[in-house]
Amino acid sequence: MKRKFLIYTLMAVLFTAGQARADEAATGVVDESKSAVNIEEQSAEGAGTGTQYDLGNVIVSATKTETYQAEIGSSTTVITAEDIARTGKRTVEEVLRDVPGLTVMQTGALGGGVSVFIRGANSGQTLVMIDGVEVNDPINASRTFDFSNLLTDNIERIEIVRGPQSTLYGSDAMAGVINIITKKGTAKPEIEGSFEGGSHNTFTENLALRGITAQDKLNYSFSATRLDSKGISKAYNGSEKDPYHNTSLSSKVGYKVLDNAELSAVVNYTDAVTGLDNGANNDVSNYTSWSRDLTSKVAFDQAINSYWTHILSFSYHDIRRKDRRDWNADDDNIMADWYKGNNKKVEWQHNISPVKWNMITAGFEYEKETGSSSYSLVPDPYGSSDHQDRKSVDNYGYYLQDQLKVWDRLFITPGLRVDDHEMFGTETTYKVSTAYLIPETGTRLKGNWGTGFKAPTLYQLYSIYGDTNLKPEENRSYDFGFEQSFLQDKLSFDLTYFHNNFKNLIEWASIGTFPYGEYRNVAKAVTKGFEVGAKIKPLDNLTFSANYTYTDSEDESTGLELVRRPKNQANFNINWGFLPKANLDFGMNYMGSRRDSDYNSVKDKPYTIFRLAASYDITENLKIFGRIENLFDRKYQEVYGYETLGRSFYAGLKAKF
């Protein structure tokens, strides 16, 4: 307790010092009243030159404040609602496949589990948030987030930050952060509805209501989406179809309780049911999985004065999962499991800008995660049934970050964080990122160096395979690169090199007695490589873009490549507004060969798939759209033993009132 008191006292002193300095200095902060949509089109002048430089989109997840992408040393990607609409993609996992540095793997189409790896790191080493609420599954063995049930209808933008982000977000963010932000009411009230139907008897309906009151006091957004599909077999070359059903609800409300303060609340809920098969190449019936996921957050955001704002928030995430398989309807041969987990978090964040060129961000977090689980097999000849009683762990986090701007060209952002975890004690992480703009030549240099950690999960600590003496996983990482634009941004190119060094990785290790294995800090791994991107815009309505990622990964305890991490990935896209009201989008995804699992020597073959999407605005409020996935009907396996969709057609209609 003494350590916690001293750390928080230090932060209080920094706040006071920042206020005192600001009394003597001119202030200048980003206008909080400007939305990302309003300001992301702006560009910056070169210092004293009159030269323009595109600063990119505004992103919040990289620094916890509104910051232009060009001013951040970390590699970032922002995907807007307009970007998603042009491709017609229905799920977030489809959207993430086009992002450099990300590898997306799904165990069977339409509801099959989805893992996302950033720069070769394990999927559980990436923090996923929805509207700022952490949604990594507390009772999952690796505390990963399953993207299979996340739909795109109500998404305003997706922010991806690659590289360690533990200084701001603590555990799980050692490889990066993915933040999904839902839509907010920003204009006059409107009702929006859409319908889409297509292959495999797949139908999606969405209804949304959004708006803002005349006095701009109250903004609101409500959305409901239903997706149903008869599906295909999860198992490769299977004959029995595995259906999928998804109901997603989303709401966001904000009210200006004062001229300088807003109280907001968000709630997102997903209820999904999918048919399963019994693993790779094993087509079975009577196997069903249920998932219920609830996220909520209440926040009070206040500008105390022109240089000091603070945000006090309370968030809650609850997930319930269960599976059941009846092997034989004539007897009691049954497999059943259930998992219950939740995460509660309180955060108090302060942003202080004592002078125009300096922004200090500091805050405190208290987080409590709880979970229980059960697995049963009847009959159970192997003694594999497992029941984990309700367990919980607490964590206190304290973070401090300083954003420095020098002549609007050099941007330096150091950060420090101390976490006090109930099980393993104190963990300190730090990071320094920098960016340098040369507007005269259209050049940006960037670099990032930092550390990250991931706490042992509840399952790794308390299950029959667990060990309460486990230490946190750790990562030391750096990346650097440059971006170059030509011909007034009609042509741009970027290159980034990255290197991750992981240690104390927690893996399941075999032992000679029951339960025949346990989790141990036994592994080390290195991932390194580079990301290359290019964009050409010969016409205002025509854009070519491409990216390529090379990832060299090694499990240093075995000398083998990390599983499901391909060395080579590439994406290509053409977007053409060929008529004033029409748009055509053509995309390609290439996935290189990769080792499939630790338990076999299978190496999945490389594949290339293409897609095509088109839309036409019949009127200002009525649009028709269609798309073809896997355009050339490529037969392939993303994960060994699991089926993927062949050529699939979808079309629909969207209306606003």
Image: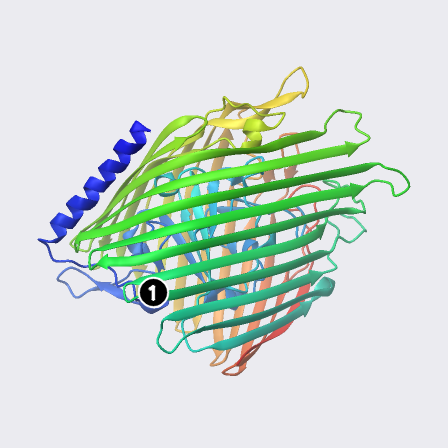
Residue 657 higher or lower than 9, as above or below: below
| Three-letter code for the amino acid on which mark 1 is drawn | Val
Where in the figure is residue 191, as x and y percent of width and height? Answer: 53, 76
Would you place residue 266 above or below residue 641 in this image?
below
| Residue at the disc numbered 1 | 257
Q: Residue at point 75% right, 59% down?
A: 230
Give x and y (percent) for residue 485.
31, 59
| Residue at the top extreme, as displayed | 512
Q: Quadrant of residue 586?
A: bottom right
Task: Tell which of 49 and 363 is nearer to you.
Answer: 363
The residue nearer to you, when weighing 529 against 456, is: 456
Q: Is residue 372 above or below residue 484?
A: above
Residue 603, x across and y down, in percent: 63, 37
Residue at image point 45% right, 52% down: 179
Q: Residue furthest left?
A: 24
- Residue 433 occupies quadrant: top left
Q: Nearer the viewer, residue 42 or 49?
A: 42
Instruction: Name the quadrant containing residue 597.
Output: top right
Residue 106 seen anywhere in this rendered image of the structure: no
Image-based side of 440 in relation to 430, left or right: left
- The front one of 104 and 254 is 254
Question: Could you tell me which residue is drawn at 37 percent across and 28 percent down?
Answer: 426
Q: Is residue 87 left or right of residue 450?
A: right
Helix, strand or loop under label 1: strand
Q: If the image is split into quadrants, where does the N terminus sit? A: top left
Q: Position of residue 166 (x, y in %)?
A: 38, 39
Q: Residues within 10 Å of mark 1 (few under 14, many from 20)?
A: some
Q: Can you see residue 585?
A: yes
